[in-house]
Image (cartoon, rainbow, N blue to C red):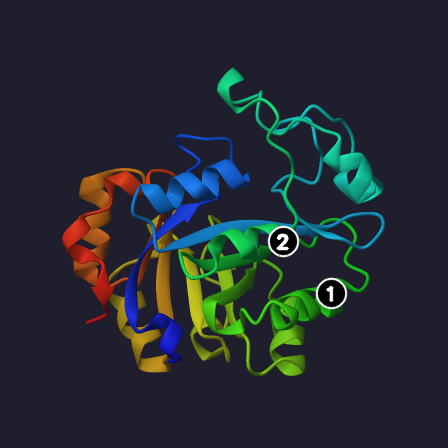
């Protein structure tokens, strides 16, 4: 297991998204202030090949825009408000670029970069590799996705990158414990003693998502997960951060 996972993580889901608009710089800054040591962010590509931090494939839920993100240029996206939907005090928050998120996180947060594969993926991995290497951030991030083929492609082309599979409500994917990945990001209901045992034996860290109840966090940490992904990093048991094991 690589050094990045030699600790237990309080991972802020899309930043401190229980307290601020998800996937904004405000949410990442608040995650730091609330004690997170990792943040999960969603990354996808604009029409002009720029990497931005945004979850949905369409704009309307968390911005003032409408329609598919992949059909907009970065300049068009930067004109949108990504904060007012959550609360007036966040008016003026913009959709950040991956470079901006990395700049904010540097020395303060590790990043779980979830690649969204529903939109414009042409050249996505090339641009991701370029950003992470140009920013000298490979040792401080893990790249994950529900699209396991995309993860495998990245792992083959960038063996120095930490990578992980995400498994959700549909259940554990075939061969997940045999996969050549560093992290298994599992929906919390998929995590039990057997899954932890299999993962550890295979050299995988396990992070559980999305866990917003403090008692549930403690139970998962007691099972041996290496991280909890939560909208509320301030609810994480503070005594549980630090080295794994």
Q: Could you give the CA–CA distance between mark 1 and mark 2, rounded to whole angstroms?
A: 10 Å
How many numbered marks, from 0 up?
A: 2
| Residue 172 or residue 208, whichever sits in front | 208
Indicate which disc, 1 or 2, sits on the residue closer to the N terminus: 2
Question: Tag 1's secondary structure?
Answer: helix
Position in image of residue 239 (x %, y %): 14, 54
The residue labelled by disc 1 is 127
Look at the numbered disc 2 and give the secondary structure of its residue: helix
Please, is residue 66 above or below residue 72 in the view? above
Mark 1: few, some, or many residues within 10 Å (few <14, many ≥20)?
Answer: some
Query: In the displayed image of the protein, which residue is found farthest to the top?
Result: 88
- Tell me if mark 2 has few (under 14), some (14-19) or many (20+) residues whose alpha carbon lies within 10 angstroms of its own: many
Q: Quadrant of the C terminus?
A: bottom left
Q: Nearer the viewer, residue 36 or 136?
A: 136
Rendered image quadrant of residue 207: bottom left
Q: Residue at x 81, y 55 (%)?
A: 49
Mark 1–mark 2 contact, CB under 8 Å?
no
89 vs 135, left or right, is left
| Residue found at x 84% / y 47% | 47
Q: Is residue 102 above or below residue 20?
A: below
The residue tagged 2 is 98
Rendered residue at 85%/51% (across/down): 48
- State the image coordinates of residue 94 (x, y, percent, origin top left): 64, 34
Residue 17 seen anywhere in this rendered image of the structure: yes
């Amino acid at each position: 297991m690589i050094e990045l996972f030699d600790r237990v993580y309080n991972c802020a889901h899309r930043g401190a998204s229980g307290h601020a608009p998800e996937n904004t710089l405000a949410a990442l800054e608040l995650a730091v202030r609330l004690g997170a040591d990792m943040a999960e962010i969603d990354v996808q590509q604009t029409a002009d090949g720029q990497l931005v931090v945004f979850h949905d494939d369409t704009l309307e839920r968390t911005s003032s825009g409408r329609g598919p993100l992949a059909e907009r240029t970065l300049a068009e996206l930067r004109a949108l408000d990504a904060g007012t939907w959550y609360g007036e005090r966040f008016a003026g928050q913009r959709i950040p670029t991956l470079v901006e998120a990395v700049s904010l996180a540097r020395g303060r947060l590790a990043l779980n970069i979830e690649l969204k594969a529903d939109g414009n993926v042409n050249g996505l991995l090339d641009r991701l590799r370029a950003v992470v290497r140009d920013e000298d951030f490979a040792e401080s991030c893990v790249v994950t996705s529900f699209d396991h083929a995309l993860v495998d492609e990245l792992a083959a082309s960038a063996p120095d990158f930490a990578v992980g599979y995400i498994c959700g409500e549909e259940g554990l994917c075939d061969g997940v414990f045999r996969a050549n990945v560093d992290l298994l990001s599992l929906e919390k209901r998929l995590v039990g003693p057997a899954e932890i045992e299999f993962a550890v034996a295979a050299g995988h860290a396990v992070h559980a998502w999305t866990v917003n109840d403090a008692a549930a966090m403690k139970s998962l940490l007691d099972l041996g997960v290496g991280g909890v992904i939560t909208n509320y990093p301030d609810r994480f048991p503070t005594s549980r951060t630090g080295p794994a094991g």
